[in-house]
Image: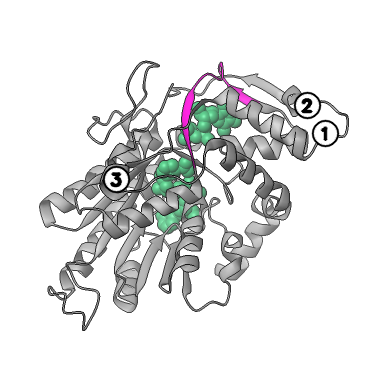
Amino acid sequence: MTILVTGGAGFIGSNFVHHCLGQSDEAVVNLDALTYAGNLGNLARWAGDPRHVFVKGDIGDRALVDQLLQTHQPRAVINFAAESHVDRSIHGPADFIQTNVVGTFHLLEAVRAYWMGLAADASGLTPPSQSHFRFLHVSTDEVYGSLSPTDPPFTETKAFEPNSPYSASKAASDHLVRAWHHTYGLPVLTTNCSNNYGPYHFPEKLIPLVIHNALAGKPLPIYGDGQQIRDWLYVQDHCSAIACVLQSGVPGETYNIGGWNEKPNLDVVNTICQLLDQMRPRSDGLSYATQITYVTDRPGHDRRYAIDARKIERELGWRPAESFETGIRKTIAWYLDNADWVANVTSGAYRQWVDQHYG
Ligand code: NAD
Ligand code: TYD
C-alpha cells in the first residue's frame, strides 16, 4: 500500500516520512514544492530506496496531483504542505493564502475526484476502496486564537478566532476540509497540534533559531517581555499521533494533539542556554544566557496557546512519549551532531544544488 504525503521535505513532514518508512512496509509518495523550508537533505537516509518516491511540485497543480493519485493509488493523503512561519506571514501574506487556502482547495478537489473513482466495496481485491480511503489534514492550535492566563486549554469545540495571517489561512483550510466532508462525504480527518520542536526544524522558529544563534555567538532575540506561552510537543510525538489518527480516527472528526507542556518563551530560552552551557560550554566560560536580547514585540502577538489533548487520549489511546525536559535535550544533541545540516539549509550553495537537481 501507498500513502501520499504533501510537504514531506519540511520539518514535520520529513519526520513523518521517517516514521512511516521506518515502521511499516508501505511506500510514501512525497509531493513537495521545495520552498525555502523544504530540504531534501532531511530525507537523505532514504535516497535510492524505492519505497520513497519524491516529486517536486505544488499541491495547487491539479494536473500533477491527478496524475500522482492515478499512478500511485494511495490509500491515504496526508497534507502537511503549507507556509508555516507567523513572522513571514506578517511581512508577506500572499504565499500563505496561495498555498494554505487555494492550494488546499485544489488538493481537496483532486482528492475528491480520485476518491469518487475508487471501488465502493472493500472486497480487498483492488485496494484501496472508497470506504478505507482517508484524507488527513495537518493543522495547528493557532486557529483557536489566544488564551488569557486563566482560560482553560483549547478543546476541539473551541470557536476559531485566528489572529495572524498564518493562522487565518490555516483556519480557512480547516473549514474547507470540514466542508468537503459535510457536503461531499469525503472521509477527512483534521489534527490541530501545538508548537513542535525537534530534528530538521528550520532555524527561523524560536527553538532552532536560539540553538543556532547561541552557537554562532549571535543575539538570542526575545520578542516583547518573553512571557508569551506556547505548549511544546516533540515532533516525533506529533508523528505518532498523526499515525494513530490515520489508523483509528473517525472521519469528519478533529483531534487536538499536545503534550501538556506550557512554557513561557523566556523559560524555554533559558533552558536551552543552561543545557548548552553543560553540553557545549562557551570558550570564555560565560553562559549563553548573556546573549539574550529583548527586541520589539511581534505585531498582534498571541499571548498563550494551550492544548487540551484529552479527546485523542480517551478515544484513540494516544499519549506523548517525551516530556519537554527529555525532548529538548534530544533536540539540542541533534543540532550539536548535525551542524552540517544547519549550514546546508542556511546556505546559498544548498539552494543552488536544489535548483540544479530539481529545476
Ligand atoms: P515547514 O515550513 O517546515 O514545511 C512545509 C513544507 O511544505 C516545506 O517542505 C515546503 O517546501 C512545502 N510546501 C510549501 N508550499 C507548498 C506547496 N504549495 N506545494 C507543495 N509543498 C509545499 O512546516 P512544518 O513546521 O513542517 O509544518 C507542517 C504542517 O504542520 C503545516 O501545515 C503547519 O501548519 C502544521 N503545524 C506546524 C506546527 C509547528 O510547530 N511547526 C504545529 C502544528 C501544525
Ligand atoms: P515561533 O517559533 O515563530 O512559533 P509560533 O509563532 O508559531 O508560536 O515562535 C514561538 C514563540 O517565540 C512566539 O511567542 C514568538 C517567540 N519568538 C521570539 O521571542 N523570538 C524569536 O526570534 C522567534 C522566532 C520567536
Write the residue at 69% across / 52% down: 347
Q: CA distance from mark 1 to mark 3?
A: 45 Å
> Disc 1 or disc 3, which is closer to the eye?
1
**Residue appearing at x 58%, y 36% in the figure:** 325
Residue 339: horizontal and vertical position, in percent? 72, 51
User: Which of pointers 1 and 3 lies earlier in the amino acid sequence?
Assistant: 3
Picture quadrant of residue 106: bottom left
Task: Specify start and end residues of the magenta stretch as a single range.
Answer: 221-233
**In this view of the protein, which residue sits in the foreground, 260 or 86?**
260
Neighbour class for label 1 at 10 Å: few (<14), some, many (≥20)? some
Q: Identify the amino acid type marked 3.
A: Ser
Residues tagged 2 and 1 counted as in contact (Cβ below 8 A): yes
Q: Quadrant of the N terminus?
A: bottom left
The residue carrying mark 3 is: 173
Query: Could you say whether the residue bearing mark 1 is in a helix, strand or loop?
Result: loop
User: Tag 1: residue type?
Assistant: Arg
Q: Is residue 129 left or right of residue 85?
A: left
Alpha carbon distance from label 2 to label 1: 7 Å
Residue on which the image places disc 2: 287
The answer for how far apart the CA atoms under marks 2 and 3 are is 43 Å
Position of residue 112 measured from the top left corner of the image (x, y, whole percent): 20, 63
Residue with the mark numbered 1: 282
Q: Residues within 10 Å of mark 3 (few under 14, many from 20)?
A: many
Residue occupying image coordinates x 42% and y 53% = 240
User: Which of the two labelled residues, at mark 2 and mark 3, occupies the earlier sequence position?
Assistant: 3
**Residue 219 image-quadrant placement:** top right
